[in-house]
Image (tube, rainbow, N blue to C red):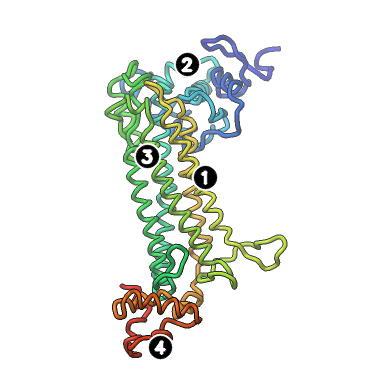
Amino acid sequence: MTQHETAHRVERDSMGEVEVPRDALFGAQTRRALDNFPISDLRFPRRFIEALGAIKLEAANVNHELGGLDESVRDAIVQAAEEVVDGRLDGQFVLDVFQTGSGTSTNMNANEVISNRAIQILGGELGSKSPVHPNDHVNRGQSSNDVIPTAIHLSAQISIQRDLLPALEKLRAALDEKANEFDGVVKTGRTHLQDATPIRLGQEFRGYAGQIERGIERVKKAQGDLAEVALGGTAVGTGVNTHPEFAGKVTQRLAARFGVEVRETENHFQAQSALDGTVFASGALKTVAVSMLKVANDVRFLGSGPRASYAEIALPEVQPGSSIMPGKVNPVIAESAAMVSAQVIGNDATIALAGGSGNFELNVMMPVIAHNLLQSIALLATTADNFTDQLVAGLEATERGPELVENGLMLATALAPEVGYDKAADLAKKAYKENKTIREVAREETDLSEDDLDRLLDAKQMTGA
């Protein structure tokens, strides 16, 4: 029986022979990594594979420009790598996230897939490494140690620019719209979960919009760090075995291709021994998650009820809320967003620990940083989009908030400049004890006229501009 009639082909690497599935585009090193890391079902996400393929593609273009690749080899690599970028070869990227800490296995997975696909394009035999070699041609001028951190930064840049920022801007705009819609709705403010002076519902929503607006700016600041990439440092940051113009030219091409800022670092030793830029970016994402958690919790509390709680806003009813209680509707969209926030906060803790796990010239937790960072970006993007469409857009104010304002004990605050803090406190306590309004007690206990009371206890006026 010939090799072509068997289920496998035999390939050789520096450690000897290994069997590879006959039609697989990956090769011996990927096969070994498959055996070595049967850890989880987690794989590198689409954005990472897209970025990795683009790095290989533009590296081939630049290596040809610099005289290091024949035109036919360049063309075949470019065509194969374009298929990686487009997602047509995703099934060939088979390795677990929990692998070698440098991501070498996945870098070689890409090199082998692109090499073998290029060989197919040129009419050669899979696994032959000829006329396109995974190391000599596809990986020319590169090392896993600079390619993988570059792919992390680039994929995060792309995902933030294309997925996260548009979703956050959409959420900010929706919250702003609700702030305007609810601007005339005066309600009781709350501090320490206790009644406070009046506030407009629109002002509360202006606060939520402001949180998201500032989150957008924080993420944009993080993009500045992510724009700086390690490519060109090769093994330990010295740039051994690469052309001095290689990284600059490749990063220019990547920036033009994706419409994001990409530039070679001025200090390769920090870029490979540490991934501080990803830690900073994750911190910005965590802050957005904390903002989302605050907004989600406020909205679900304000919508709680409908009869035994706040019920100051009505949430869209999207699904039945109970398997036992008929007619119950729960704030499930807000709960979903809160869980995503918890996940992103947890991801940040992992990234922080992983970011500190550089030993001398190399960080050795790069794959888990890639996974968690990109997962956080993707989760925040989809959640912000869903939260906007399924919840914020359909929110309505009820009459409950305005109805409670006249009974608010903290209206006594407005009397303090006239009667003094201690007297105002006595009025509030008496109003509570006797189940009266501040207005009623003030009539009994002060010399303030009705006009004075109307002026001082104007709840809307107390909310400011």
10 Å neighbourhood of mark 2: few (<14), some, or many (≥20)? Answer: some
- Distance (Cα) linking label 1 and label 2: 46 Å
Q: Toward the viewer: 73 or 59?
A: 59
**The N terminus: image quadrant:** top right
- Distance (Cα) linking label 2 and label 3: 43 Å
Q: Earlier in the sequence, mark 4 or mark 3?
A: 3
Is disc 1 placed on a helix, strand or loop? helix
Tell me what residue is drawn at x 33 percent, y 19 percent. Answer: 242
Query: Which mark, residue 131?
Result: 2
Q: Earlier in the sequence, mark 4 or mark 2?
A: 2
Q: Amino acid at mark 2?
A: Pro
Query: Which mark, residue 444?
Result: 4
Residue under label 3, please give it.
280
Q: Amino acid at mark 1?
A: Gln
**Res. 132 in view:** no
- Distance (Cα) linking label 3 and label 1: 17 Å
Marks 4 and 3 in Cβ contact (< 8 Å): no
Query: Which mark, residue 188?
Result: none
Q: Earlier in the sequence, mark 4 or mark 1?
A: 1
Q: Amino acid at mark 4?
A: Glu
Numbered disc in front, either 4 or 2: 4
